[in-house]
Amino acid sequence: MKKSMEEQRELQNLEWIDLLCQHGSHEEFESIKENAKCTALAIMEYRGILMDRGIGKHITDKHLKAGNISPVEELQFYLQLMFLEPISIKKIEYFYESATKRGYKSLNDAVEELYRRHIKDTGKRFMSIVLSI
């Protein structure tokens, strides 16, 4: 049976909350959510707080390149930590395909560009950068 839009949104919210609370706490998130207009805004606010604390800033292009030659789940782990957002394997595959179509000679070159753009604006989401590469 197909899930309703509301059920899908709730599942996405839970995925975000679980990821963020791995690096923070459910109690802290809940206190932010109490004062937010909606769950999605609380999620984005908490993401910003965690990023301001430096969560994920230790990830370098070397981590991403190493993850690029390992199982895709390792790259997924590093990207999710760096962007502090859930990133599916399908989105990573799209990134690979898009980079190839746009003429990047190697995936390492595309990963370097992704990293460079993220460092330039850490608030940007993964797909926002991927769509502009």
Image: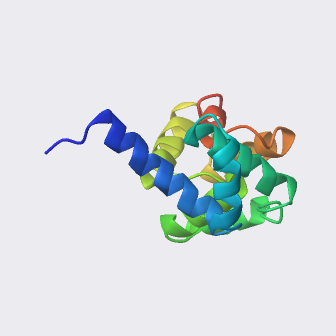
Q: Nearer the viewer, residue 87 or 55?
A: 55
What colouring does the structure picture have?
rainbow
Which quarter of the picture shows residue 8?
Answer: top left
Residue 81 as seen in the image, left or right of residue 119: left
Q: Looking at this view, is 112 or 74 the one in front?
A: 74
Inspect this view and state whether residue 38 appears: yes
Q: Residue at x 32, y 34 (%)?
A: 5
Residue 115 in the image, given as x and y percentages of width and height: 75, 49
- The image quadrant of residue 99 is top right
* Residue 65 visible in this rendered orientation of the protein: no
Q: Is residue 106 above or below residue 97?
A: below
Across and down, in percent, residue 71 comes to 49, 70
Q: Residue 70 appears at what percent x and percent y?
A: 55, 71
Tell me the residue at 63%/39% (across/down).
Answer: 104
Q: Quadrant of residue 124?
A: top right
Q: Is residue 72 left or right of residue 46?
A: left
Q: Residue furthest left?
A: 1
Figure label count: 0
Query: Measured from the top left, where is residue 31 in percent x and y?
Result: 69, 55
On the rendered image, what quadrant is the C terminus found in? top right
Image quadrant in which the N terminus is located: top left
